[in-house]
Amino acid sequence: MSSGSSRPIKPGDVVTGSGGKTIEIINTDAEGRLILSDGITYAVNEGATHIVDIATLTGSIMRTLGPLAIGAFGNDQGLMDLVRRAADLAGERIWELPTWADYDGLIESEIADIKNSTVPWAGATTAALFLREFVDGRPWVHLDIAGSAWQDASELKTVPKGPTGSGVRVMAHLAQLLAGH
């Protein structure tokens, strides 16, 4: 990600991602998706046939699913089914959320190829839609672990307080499943 200068980035700026896509900065706190988009671009450039990214990306997913489930978004049902199977093998909960085309306009920009953030609702979905713009048509799943990566609620008896390792076992099982195909 390069802003073209060493000055701080502020709302209204346009930056260029490593793949050449221009991004209008709406929210400087939505920087994680910028970095992740460069990682996805790198995977595409290296010839990845499938892309699964995992990140503590949005507070929105925390408010949607709480601390017990991983939010999943994707563009390929076959890959999503493999991720769901990996989660079952790992004993972790994954909940697939929509990337409806109706929301595509929320990340459109008048001054760049795409916006990094948008309206105050559907935040996890619009973050996933942003990432989808960089997968270049490859089968892709995004796992948002912002809610499940850390457990604070002492009222929940099934998950101890502290870091959970959410998603690690899912990714290990997914690698095994993909290797078997």
Image (cartoon, rainbow, N blue to C red):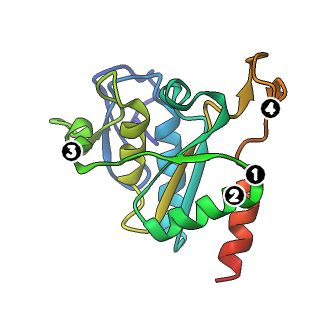
Q: Mark 2 points at which residue?
A: 88
Residue 43 visible in the shown view: no
Q: In terms of sequence position, does the residue under pointer 4 or pointer 1 come before the other? A: 1
Q: In terms of sequence position, does the residue under pointer 2 or pointer 3 come before the other? A: 2
Q: In terms of sequence position, does the residue under pointer 4 or pointer 2 come before the other? A: 2
Secondary structure, mark 2, is helix
> In the rendered view, does 110 fall on the left or right side of 62?
left
Please report the residue visible at 27 percent of the width from the left and 23 percent of the height from the top. 12
The nearer-to-camera label among 1 and 3 is 1
Q: Look at the numbered discs 4 and 1 and tell me whether their residues touch, using CB distance below 8 Å.
A: no
The nearer-to-camera label among 3 and 4 is 4
> Taking 21 as reference, is 158 above or below it?
above
> Taking 11 as reference, is 147 above or below it?
below
Q: Look at the numbered discs 1 and 3 and tell me whether their residues touch, using CB distance below 8 Å.
A: no
Which disc number belongs to residue 158? 4
* Residue 25 pos. (x, y %): 34, 29
Please report the residue visible at 78 percent of the width from the left and 41 percent of the height from the top. 165
Residue type at mark 4? Thr
> In the rendered view, does 48 fall on the left or right side of 127?
right
At label 4, counting other C-alpha atoms closer than 10 Å, the crowd grade (few under 14, some 14-19, many 20 or more) is few
Residue type at mark 3? Asp
Q: Mark 1 points at which residue?
A: 91
Q: In terms of sequence position, does the residue under pointer 3 or pointer 4 come before the other? A: 3
Please report the residue visible at 80 percent of the width from the left and 32 percent of the height from the top. 158
* Residue 79 pos. (x, y %): 52, 67
Q: Look at the numbered discs 1 and 2 and tell me whether their residues touch, using CB distance below 8 Å.
A: yes
Residue type at mark 2? Asp
Q: Mark 3 points at which residue?
A: 102
* Residue 111 pos. (x, y %): 18, 36
Q: In terms of sequence position, does the residue under pointer 1 or pointer 3 come before the other? A: 1
At label 2, counting other C-alpha atoms closer than 10 Å, the crowd grade (few under 14, some 14-19, many 20 or more) is some
